[in-house]
């Protein structure tokens, strides 16, 4: 589990028993002092708003009515909101209708997105970090900067530039057409077809040919649509996101690679291990805390993908890039249903938390080997 | 113990945050919030404000051009401390009025009769008029003169009908080999056809009656069959299909001979495609007669407001006959909201833009009830799937009508 | 660390050839990959020096040719069409986009951005590393709970926190103030988490040795632990600086009401037209270059601190 302060005493030191208790107290005081400034800031500006969001998720607040007007009651008919209990959650999860359909569509899209992006960006980041950390590599500074470059530019700017590259007459299509004369133009950023559907279509498997089970609705969404895979447009946004975050994650791996003391490698060389064995048996295991960090941050970040969708697709075409984080924004600010938005956000919180716990167990179990 | 400490700390801050505190203000400063527009328009607004401050020396106007207007305004509303005067888009007015953050106009607005009736109606909610429009735009048909000449097709006129539009599209498409008409595939364009087919949004009692039984349902089906038919037969494309960000850009690039956009396209084409040879005409009439859509914004006055009188003085200064004349003489893309200054706008902007003004006679604003975003999304998705052949026109309209029923039940 | 695994003479000839070619191949792949990463920015820079019609007509043109500094508007005030200023791959550069940006309140925005970014970065380096160290190494009541609370704050979409945070700041009287921005953002969960994971991955022999020497935790942290953390602190500094340099939403909520406190992203956004109207691309791209360039330079300077094979003195051997 947590590698927190497991006192694997490397040096056999005998401490006087009487001071152990006072040492513990001292350590506790030090710990709380160290963490206090950061904790207070996060409590006031993150945790309290978070509690407020949880509170709003139980109301029908529209996000416009001034909160200073208080709760609606008989004496206060002009209040800002009333309690609706778990109705917002019920509408999202259980009651059939457009809200449920919206939420599960967003959930489906988000899961495809996360499962596609996280492994790829983690793998790429580790590979790039190891490469630019090699001693033999010339012009390291150039490559580090180059690989980090897409991360520097703000997501709004990079999204607009990406849009311009991938429009149907954009440079990407022009280049493809030049290379493959038969190339059928793809409208990358406006194509709602799922890639799994497209793939199945190659073998003549379509919704009509698979039979009636595909029309079965689970949570307002047809089984056939659950297995659509990300749409072509979503795939583009996944590529964009991988391209921009890989640089950031590479920098984290780079910092971590410095921590591996060189004597560890030297010992391995003496034992006659080759480069691949060293990477596999020494570098990767020693980077495990970093990998836990990178995967966790990756999960959290991808589950909350918003900026790129806000700029590029606004959830379209045909809701195939509607993600949960975008749904939160759309219901809170466009549809003015802040209570609903808060409930959606809380559900997303629970989903991310669960995923993080699962992967934490997964990574640390292997770490204990 | 430490847990209780944490919890009580959190509660204390929460109480502090959501307890009501009234901040008193002594000096008369009117905050005016808006979003960015063209540099020339912004300069003109600043000049107007300077003139106002000169005429009313005891009022200071603090103009804020917000970088992300809707979000910032909504946060201000929620906190209870929001600007005295602010821009209100036509799609927001019902929500704001319903939430009680807009002060009714009552008789604070000068010469309401002079404002175009459609614009008065747009900013009326439940029978109450809230705010005077600052300016507006109408959809017209823009056409590429050179491409019409090449195909040997007569230019569009005010008398055009759907048949003329379709016939011209067919001829041009055949002559050039590319679709003649570029238009966004969404309800802010399609509604124009719905109106031309005789469809309405509200009945006399103010109930939302989109595609309800009878005439409206027929109009919806008819309008969608015509609109979708243009796409199905290869006569129309979306701007995305031809690699443009929006229809104005596609039209500017010469990707199609016609498009339908509002006044905002004028300055865009002049700036980005200065050598394009184009003109505009009123939209064609449908089986239900003439129809177009209008898009507008008003100056709203805050309901929770320490200085209502000064706020209305500012709003009137900006929107009364003289204010409208100043907008007109500036000659921006958008038109002043008063009929009395239409000629002045044409003179400043150019007589060739007369169709934009002429459309005002029958323009309607496609304003939906509060919280109807889902309806917009459903109908737009329905349009897309109808064009792609994934659903029928009737199903698309039926889906949208079901969402309307669900939303109205709330 | 060294790269040659086995002495060359022990390898079969085929592997010897592979070993020769491999660096060349991988270098080529690396260069292509690097170009892919930079190319969009090359187009951004090139187009930021064009007139609006030229961006629309020939966006792919990236070779500037004389005459330089062309005007996009004719003496009569008419916008010039694209073909007057651009060809297929070449274009006559214009600085009108930059002039428009500089005509706005650019100096003030840049100053504010620098203040926010630098002060927040310094505070985060201190607070995040202290907190990260405490979570990684010190035993105190609520350690695990606090870690999960901090991690949890990352997991909720920030759009839903905007309004509550706005109201808290209003009650504190910190709306539209420098301290509103700086204190609100002076610590972040991401940074704490980063530092915690880092401290967990460094060997604890050194600290234990120091502890035996009787150094107290504060002294030890600043004298011994922090200097070892240079790579992680560098990464944190880069992320923090860059995040604040590009920060839009937090700045909007906190100082959105006072244009003289805007940072660059907010300021440049006010120059954008209303929706439905045109994005003034030349101006937008010029603004993007102005905001991105300092970051690129700073990163290039800082990345030197990622030196391979750092060894902990005293541990070697």
Image (cartoon, rainbow, N blue to C red):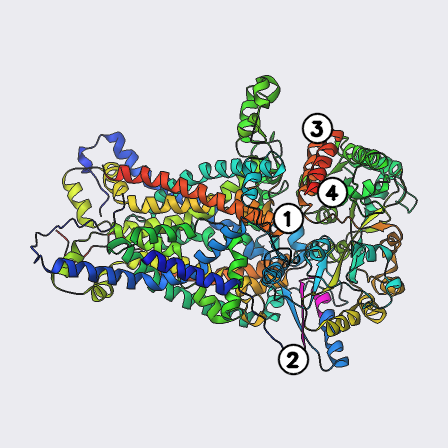
Residue beneath the point at 39% across and 44% down: C30
Marks 2/4: CA distance? Answer: 46 Å
Left or right, residue B143 beside residue A81 = right
User: In the figure, A290 relative to C133: above or below?
Assistant: above
Foreground pick, A73 / C142: A73
- Label whose residue precedes the other's in the sequence (3 or 4): 4
Name the mark on residue B235: none
**In this orientation, does residue A155 appear?**
no
How crowded is the residue under tag 3: few (<14 C-alpha within 10 Å), some, or many (20+)? few
Residue drawn 49% across and 63% down?
A: B15
Report crowding for label 4: few under 14, some 14 to 19, many 20 or more residues within 10 A (C-alpha). Answer: some
x, y percentage for residue B49? 73, 74
Depth check: give the residue in front, A358 or C303: A358
How far apart are the two marked residues, 4 and 1, measured between alpha carbons? 17 Å
User: Tag 2, which secondary structure?
Assistant: loop
Nearer to us of marks 2 and 4 is 2
> Which residue is under mark 4?
B187
Query: Callout 2: few (<14), some (14-19), or many (20+) C-alpha neighbours within 10 Å?
Result: few
| Helix, strand or loop for disc 1 | loop
Residue A341 rendering spot, x and y as whole percentages: 56, 48
Q: Which residue is mark 3?
A: B389
Mark pair 1, 3: CA separation: 29 Å
Q: Mark 2 — residue?
A: B27
Residues at marks 2 and 4 on the same chain: yes
Chain under disc 1: A
Instruction: Using a 10 Å C-alpha cutoff, classify the residue at mark 1 as few (fewer than 14 neighbours), some (14 to 19) or many (20 or more).
Output: many
Q: Which mark is residue A335?
A: 1
User: Toward which corner of the image does residue C132 lie, by quadrant?
Assistant: bottom left
Q: What residue range appears in magenta?
A: B27-43
Going from N to C along the chain, the mark reached first, 2 or 3, is: 2
């Amino acid at each position: 589990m947590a590698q927190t302060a497991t006192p694997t005493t490397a040096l056999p030191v005998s401490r006087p028993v009487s001071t152990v208790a006072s040492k513990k107290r001292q350590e506790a005081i030090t710990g709380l002092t160290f963490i206090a400034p950061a904790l207070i800031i996060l409590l006031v500006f993150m945790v309290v708003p978070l509690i407020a969001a949880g509170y709003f998720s139980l109301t029908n607040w529209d996000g416009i009515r001034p909160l200073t007007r208080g709760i609606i009651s008989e004496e206060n008919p002009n209040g800002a909101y009333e309690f609706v209990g778990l109705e917002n959650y019920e509408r999202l999860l259980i009651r059939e209708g457009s809200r449920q359909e919206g939420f599960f569509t967003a959930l489906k899209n988000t899961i495809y997105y996360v499962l596609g992006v996280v492994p790829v960006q983690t793998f790429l980041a580790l590979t790039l970090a190891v490469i630019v950390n090699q001693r033999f590599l010339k012009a390291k500074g150039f490559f580090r900067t180059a690989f980090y470059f897409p991360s520097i530019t703000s997501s709004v700017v990079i999204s607009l530039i990406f849009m311009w590259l991938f429009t149907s007459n954009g440079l990407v299509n022009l280049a493809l057409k030049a290379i493959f004369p038969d190339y059928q133009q793809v409208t990358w950023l406006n194509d709602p077809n799922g890639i799994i559907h497209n793939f199945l279509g190659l073998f003549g498997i379509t919704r009509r040919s698979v039979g009636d089970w595909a029309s079965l609705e689970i949570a307002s969404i047809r089984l056939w649509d659950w297995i659509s895979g990300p749409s072509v447009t979503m795939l583009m946004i996944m590529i964009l996101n991988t391209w921009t975050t890989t640089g950031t994650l590479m920098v984290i791996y780079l910092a971590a690679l410095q921590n591996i003391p060189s004597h560890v490698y030297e010992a391995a060389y003496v034992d006659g291990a080759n480069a691949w064995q060293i990477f596999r048996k020494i570098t990767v295991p020693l980077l495990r805390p970093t990998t836990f960090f990178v995967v966790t941050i990756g999960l959290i970040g991808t589950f909350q993908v918003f900026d790129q969708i806000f700029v590029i697709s606004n959830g379209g075409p045909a809701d195939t890039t509607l993600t949960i984080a975008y749904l939160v924004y759309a219901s809170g600010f466009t549809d003015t249903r802040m209570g609903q938005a808060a409930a959606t956000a809380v559900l997303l919180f629970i989903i991310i938390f669960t995923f993080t716990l699962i992967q934490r167990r997964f990574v640390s179990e292997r770490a204990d080997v | 113990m430490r847990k209780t400490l944490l919890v009580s700390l959190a509660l204390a801050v929460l109480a502090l945050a959501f307890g009501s505190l009234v901040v008193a203000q002594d000096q008369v400063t009117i905050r005016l919030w808006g979003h960015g527009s063209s540099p020339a328009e912004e300069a003109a607004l600043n000049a107007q404000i300077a003139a106002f401050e000169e005429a009313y020396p005891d009022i200071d106007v603090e103009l804020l051009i917000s970088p992300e207007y809707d979000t910032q305004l909504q946060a201000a509303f929620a906190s209870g401390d929001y600007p005295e005067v602010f821009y209100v888009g036509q799609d927001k007015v019902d929500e704001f009025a319903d939430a009680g953050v807009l002060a009714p106009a009552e008789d604070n607005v000068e010469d309401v009769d002079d404002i175009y009736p459609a614009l008065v109606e747009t900013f009326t909610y439940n029978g109450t008029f809230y705010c005077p429009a600052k300016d507006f735009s109408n959809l017209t048909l823009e056409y590429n003169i050179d491409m019409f000449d090449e195909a040997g097709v007569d230019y569009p006129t005010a008398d055009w009908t759907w048949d003329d539009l379709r016939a011209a599209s067919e001829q041009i498409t055949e002559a050039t080999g590319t679709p003649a008409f570029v238009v966004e595939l969404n309800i802010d364009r399609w509604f124009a056809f719905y109106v031309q087919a005789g469809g309405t949004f509200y009945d006399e009692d103010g109930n939302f009656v989109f595609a309800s039984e009878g005439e409206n349902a027929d109009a919806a089906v008819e309008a969608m069959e015509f609109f979708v038919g243009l796409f199905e037969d290869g006569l129309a494309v979306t701007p995305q299909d031809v690699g443009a960000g929006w229809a104005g850009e596609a039209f500017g690039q010469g990707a199609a001979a016609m498009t339908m956009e509002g006044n905002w396209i004028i300055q865009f084409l002049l700036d980005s495609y200065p050598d394009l040879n184009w003109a505009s005409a009123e939209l064609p009439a449908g089986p239900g007669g003439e129809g177009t859509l209008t898009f507008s914004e008003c100056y709203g006055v805050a309901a929770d407001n320490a200085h209502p009188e000064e706020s209305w003085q500012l709003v009137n200064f900006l929107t009364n006959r003289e204010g409208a004349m100043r907008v007109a003489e500036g000659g921006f893309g958008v038109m002043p909201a008063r009929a009395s200054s239409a000629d002045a706008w044409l003179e400043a902007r150019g007589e060739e833009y007369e169709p934009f003004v002429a459309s005002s006679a029958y323009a309607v604003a496609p304003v939906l009830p509060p919280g109807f975003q889902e309806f917009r999304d459903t109908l737009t998705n329905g349009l897309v799937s109808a064009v792609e052949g994934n659903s029928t026109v009737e199903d698309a309209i039926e889906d949208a009508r079901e969402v309307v029923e669900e939303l109205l039940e709330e | 660390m060294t790269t040659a695994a086995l002495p060359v003479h022990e390898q079969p000839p085929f592997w010897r050839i592979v070993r020769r070619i491999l660096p060349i191949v991988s270098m080529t792949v690396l260069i292509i990959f690097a170009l892919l990463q930079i190319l969009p920015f090359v187009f951004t820079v090139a187009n930021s020096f064009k007139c609006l019609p030229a961006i629309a007509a020939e966006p792919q043109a990236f070779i500037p040719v004389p005459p330089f500094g062309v005007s996009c508007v004719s003496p009569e005030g008419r916008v010039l069409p694209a073909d007057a200023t651009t060809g297929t791959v070449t274009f006559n550069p214009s600085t009108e986009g930059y002039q428009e940006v500089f005509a706005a309140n650019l100096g003030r925005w840049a100053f504010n951005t620098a203040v926010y970014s630098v002060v927040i970065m310094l505070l985060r380096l201190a607070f995040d590393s202290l907190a990260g160290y405490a979570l990684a190494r010190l035993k105190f009541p609520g350690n695990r709970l606090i870690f999960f609370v901090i991690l949890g704050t990352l997991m909720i979409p920030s759009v839903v926190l905007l309004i509550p945070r706005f109201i808290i700041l209003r009650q504190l009287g910190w709306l539209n103030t420098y301290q509103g921005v700086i204190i609100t953002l002076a610590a972040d969960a991401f940074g704490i988490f980063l530092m915690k994971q880092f401290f967990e991955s460094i060997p604890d022999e050194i600290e234990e040795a120091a502890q035996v020497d009787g150094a107290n935790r504060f002294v030890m942290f600043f004298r011994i632990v922090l200097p070892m953390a240079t790579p992680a602190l560098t990464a944190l500094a880069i992320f923090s600086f860059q995040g604040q340099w590009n920060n839009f939403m937090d700045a909007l909520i906190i100082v959105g009401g006072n244009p003289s406190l805007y940072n660059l992203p907010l300021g440049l956004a006010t120059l954008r037209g209303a929706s439905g109207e045109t994005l003034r691309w030349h101006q937008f791209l010029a603004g993007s270059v102005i905001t991105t360039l300092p970051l690129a330079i700073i990163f290039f300077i800082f990345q030197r601190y990622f030196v391979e094979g750092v060894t902990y003195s005293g541990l070697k051997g």
